[in-house]
Image (cartoon, rainbow, N blue to C red):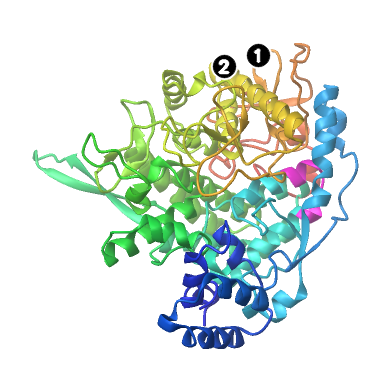
C-alpha cells in the first residue's frame, strides 16, 4: 500500500472520528503522532472499540484514551542535531557595519543550532508506524507546528545556510530532496505521508544553483542532474495545461493558438488529513461530487504554497463575494509558477552546458524559449503593463494585485522591450506601496493568511531582487526602499518578541501576521533578512551582493564608486551602460538570460579566479 493511502494517517474511520471529535486544537497534531504498535494492531483495537459502541460512534473520552494508548507524542521521530559546519561568527558578520544589525545577525546565526534535526533510524526501518517521510541527511526545520521539512521554504533555508558558510548542511538538504525525487518522482509538499500527492513550487534546481555558486561542486551536479530532470518531467507531465487563445486569422475568421504552460493541480479528493475537520465543515451542504472537487482544489492551493488566498477564488457574478469555498486553483494559470519554471529551464540548459551535454542543453533552451513566448502571450497584460494570472474558466486575466505578478522580473523570464518599466509603473499605480512595512500579499481582506494585511518574506525577496536586477534606476531605488523598510520592520518585531515570524501585518505599526487556519508561526530558518534585504547604494547603480559577499546596513555607505567589479546588464551583455555591478569574485553570477542562452558572449577580463580555477566553463 502507498504511504499516502494509509488508513490511519490519510484515510479511514479512525482518522475521521478523531478529527471530527476535535480531540486537539490543531488537526495536524494527531496525524504527526507515531504509532506505538503496528498499524494492523492499532486498527484491530479500534475496530473492537467501534464494535463495542452502539452506533459505532466512539465517545470523545474513549477516543482520547485510545489515542494516548496507541500513539506517541509528535516530534519523537527526530533527534536534535547540531551542524558541524556551524560557526559562532561566520565571515558575513564582519561585513555588517551597523552594530545593531550585527548583533541581531549574531543571534539569528545561533538559531541554526536550535533548528537542526536528524531523522530517527526507526523511521527508516518501520515507516508504516510514522507519518514522517524518511530522508537520509540532517536538516533544518521551520519551527513551530511545522516539525518537518517543507519544500519551497527550504530554498530560503538553503540560501541562509550558504550565507553562513554552512555548505555541508545545505548540500545534505539538497540531497534529501533529490532522494525524494528518486522515490516519488517529485518533491512532496512537506515531509509527511499525507503531503505525498502534492508538491510545492519547484525550487530544487535553484537550490542547486545557489550551492554551485558557493562551492563549484560539478561532481555533485553531475550525479544530481538526472534527478533534477526527473522533477522537471513531473511538472511537464502531471501539472501541464494547454491554453488556447483566439487570434484573428488572415481570412477574418477566428483561429485558436495553443500554448503549453503549467498550473497547480492535485486531482485527489478527500479532506486534507492535517486540516480534516475544517475541510469537512467547509464542504457542508455540497453534493458529494462537489465536495470531492472542493477538497481537491484546496489541495491544489496547498501545493502552490499560498494556502489560502483570494488568488484562487473563482468570483461569482457581482455583488456576490467569493470565499474559500469558491477555491478553484486548477482553473488558474499562475504567473509565479511559470516564471519559476522558465528559470528552471534556463538553469537546466546551463547545467547541461557545464557538463558538456550540448544536445540536452539545446533542448532545455528550446523549452525555455517556448515558455517565454507562452508567458508573453498568455500572462502579459499590455493594458495593465504587467503579468497577470490567467483564469481558464473565465478565459481572462485576474486584474487584482499580487506580488506574484512581478515574479518574472526576478526569474528573468521574458523581459524584452519596455517590460521592466511598464511593470514598475504598474506597481507604482497600486496602493501596495502605501504600506510602510512591506508589500501586502494582496489588497483584499478575506481573513486568509495569503491576503491583506499579511506580508511574507519569500515574496518580498523575489520582488525586491527582481527590481534590483533591472537596469532601471527607478526600480533600483524602489528595491532599496522596500528592502530597508522590510529589514527595519523585521528588526523591530524581533526586538519586541525575540523571534522571526512567517508573516507580518503590514498595517499599523507592524506586528506578527494573522489569519488562516492556525496561529502565526515562528520561522527562524528563513533566509535571514540581513542576508538579502540590506542592499547597499553605491554611486548610481545598486550593488547587489552575491550570496555571502556583502552585509546589510540601515545607513547608506559613502558614495564611493564600486571597485574590482564587473558591469553586467541582463539584456545588453557586459559593459552595457546603466547595468548592475557585482563583485569580481561573483562575476560568474550572470542572470539566467546570459547563462546558457547567451553562451557566445566573451569572457569579461574581470572574470577570472575562483570560477576559472574550479574549471567551470564560461558563461556559468
Q: Please say if 570 is above or below 249.
A: above
Which residue is depicted at the point 54% across and 20% down? 475
Q: Tell me, for residue 473, which label it has, or none.
A: 2
- The residue closer to the viewer here, 541 or 18, is 18
Image coordinates of residue 199 in percent, x first then y, are 51, 59
Magenta run includes residue 267: no
Residue 164 magenta:
yes
For image coordinates 64% across by 55% down, the residue present is 146
Question: Residue at point 85% right, 33% down?
Answer: 93
- Residue 136 in the image: above or below residue 452: below
Q: CA distance from mark 1 to mark 2?
A: 8 Å
List the residue tagged with mark 1: 540
Callout 2 secondary element: helix
Horizontal side of residue 473 vs 620, given as left or right = left
Which quadrant: the C terminus? top right
How dense is the environment of label 2, judged by Cα within 10 Å: few (below 14), some, or many (20 and up)? some
**Where residue 615 sits in the image (x, y, percent)?**
76, 50
Residue 619 in view in this figure? yes
Q: Magenta segment range?
A: 160-169
Q: Do the residues bearing badges 1 and 2 touch, measured as CB atoms within 8 Å?
A: yes
Query: Which one is in front, 473 or 180?
Result: 180
- Quadrant housing residue 168: bottom right
Give the answer, above or below, for where 419 lies relative to 342: above
Which is more toward the observer, 228 or 391? Answer: 391
Q: 570 left or right of 385?
A: right
> Whole-percent x and y of residue 99?
86, 23
Q: Which residue is pictured at 52% across the width and 62% down the height?
A: 22
Q: Is residue 98 above or below residue 76?
A: above
Amino acid at each position: 500500500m502507498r504511504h499516502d493511502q494509509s488508513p490511519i494517517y490519510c484515510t479511514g474511520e479512525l482518522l475521521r472520528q478523531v478529527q471530527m471529535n476535535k480531540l486537539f486544537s490543531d488537526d495536524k497534531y494527531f496525524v504527526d503522532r507515531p504509532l506505538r504498535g503496528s498499524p494492523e494492531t492499532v486498527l484491530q483495537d479500534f475496530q473492537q472499540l467501534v464494535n463495542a459502541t452502539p452506533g459505532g460512534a466512539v465517545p470523545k473520552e474513549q477516543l482520547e484514551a485510545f489515542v494516548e494508548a496507541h500513539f506517541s507524542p509528535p516530534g519523537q521521530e527526530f533527534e536534535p542535531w547540531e551542524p558541524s559546519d556551524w560557526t559562532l561568527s561566520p565571515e558575513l558578520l564582519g561585513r555588517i557595519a551597523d552594530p545593531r544589525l550585527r548583533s541581531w545577525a549574531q543571534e539569528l546565526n545561533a538559531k541554526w543550532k536550535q533548528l537542526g534535526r536528524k531523522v530517527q533510524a526507526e523511521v527508516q526501518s518501520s515507516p508504516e508506524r510514522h507519518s514522517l517521510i524518511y530522508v537520509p541527511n540532517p536538516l533544518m526545520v521551520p519551527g513551530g507546528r511545522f516539525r518537518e521539512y517543507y519544500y519551497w521554504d527550504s530554498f530560503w533555508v538553503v540560501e541562509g545556510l550558504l550565507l553562513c558558510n554552512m555548505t555541508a548542511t545545505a548540500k545534505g538538504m539538497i540531497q534529501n530532496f533529490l532522494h525524494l525525487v528518486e522515490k516519488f518522482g517529485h518533491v512532496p509538499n512537506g515531509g509527511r505521508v499525507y503531503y505525498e500527492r502534492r508538491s510545492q513550487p519547484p525550487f530544487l534546481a535553484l537550490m542547486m544553483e545557489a550551492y554551485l555558486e558557493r562551492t563549484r561542486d560539478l561532481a555533485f551536479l553531475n550525479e544530481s542532474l538526472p534527478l533534477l530532470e526527473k522533477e522537471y518531467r513531473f511538472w511537464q507531465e502531471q501539472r501541464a495545461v494547454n491554453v488556447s487563445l483566439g487570434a484573428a486569422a488572415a481570412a477574418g475568421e477566428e483561429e485558436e493558438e495553443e500554448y503549453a504552460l503549467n498550473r497547480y493541480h492535485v486531482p485527489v479528493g478527500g479532506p486534507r488529513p492535517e486540516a480534516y475537520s475544517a475541510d469537512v465543515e467547509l464542504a457542508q451542504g455540497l453534493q458529494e461530487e462537489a465536495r470531492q472537487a472542493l477538497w481537491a482544489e484546496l489541495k491544489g492551493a496547498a501545493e502552490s504554497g499560498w494556502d489560502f488566498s483570494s488568488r484562487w477564488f473563482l468570483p461569482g457574478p457581482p455583488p456576490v463575494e467569493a470565499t474559500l469555498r469558491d477555491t478553484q486553483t486548477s482553473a488558474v494559470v499562475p504567473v509565479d509558477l511559470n516564471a519559476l519554471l522558465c528559470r528552471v529551464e534556463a538553469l537546466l540548459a546551463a547545467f547541461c552546458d557545464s557538463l558538456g551535454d550540448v544536445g540536452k542543453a539545446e533542448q532545455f533552451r528550446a523549452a525555455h524559449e517556448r515558455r517565454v513566448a507562452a508567458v508573453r502571450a498568455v500572462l502579459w497584460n499590455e493594458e495593465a503593463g504587467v503579468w497577470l494570472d490567467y483564469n481558464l474558466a473565465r478565459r481572462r486575466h485576474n486584474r487584482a494585485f499580487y506580488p506574484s505578478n512581478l515574479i518574472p522580473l526576478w526569474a528573468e523570464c521574458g523581459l524584452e522591450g519596455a517590460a521592466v518599466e511598464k511593470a514598475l509603473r504598474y506597481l507604482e499605480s497600486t496602493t501596495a506601496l502605501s504600506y510602510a512595512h512591506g508589500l501586502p500579499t494582496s489588497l483584499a481582506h478575506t481573513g486568509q493568511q495569503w491576503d491583506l494585511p499579511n506580508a511574507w518574506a519569500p515574496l518580498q525577496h523575489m520582488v525586491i531582487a527582481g527590481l534590483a536586477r533591472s537596469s532601471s534606476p527607478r526600480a533600483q531605488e524602489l528595491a532599496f526602499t522596500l528592502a530597508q523598510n522590510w529589514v527595519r520592520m523585521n528588526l523591530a518585531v524581533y526586538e519586541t518578541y525575540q523571534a522571526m515570524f512567517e508573516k507580518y501585518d503590514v498595517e499599523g505599526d507592524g506586528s506578527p501576521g494573522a489569519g488562516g487556519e492556525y496561529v502565526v508561526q515562528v520561522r527562524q530558518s528563513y533566509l535571514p533578512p540581513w542576508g538579502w534585504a540590506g542592499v547597499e547604494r553605491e554611486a548610481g547603480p545598486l550593488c547587489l551582493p552575491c550570496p555571502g559577499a556583502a552585509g546589510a546596513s540601515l545607513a547608506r555607505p559613502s558614495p564611493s564608486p564600486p571597485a574590482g567589479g564587473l558591469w553586467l546588464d541582463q539584456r545588453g551583455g557586459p559593459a552595457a551602460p546603466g547595468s548592475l555591478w557585482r563583485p569580481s569574485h561573483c562575476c560568474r553570477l550572470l542572470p539566467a538570460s546570459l547563462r546558457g542562452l547567451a553562451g557566445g558572449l566573451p569572457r569579461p577580463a574581470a572574470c577570472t579566479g575562483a570560477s576559472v580555477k574550479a574549471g567551470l566553463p564560461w558563461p556559468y
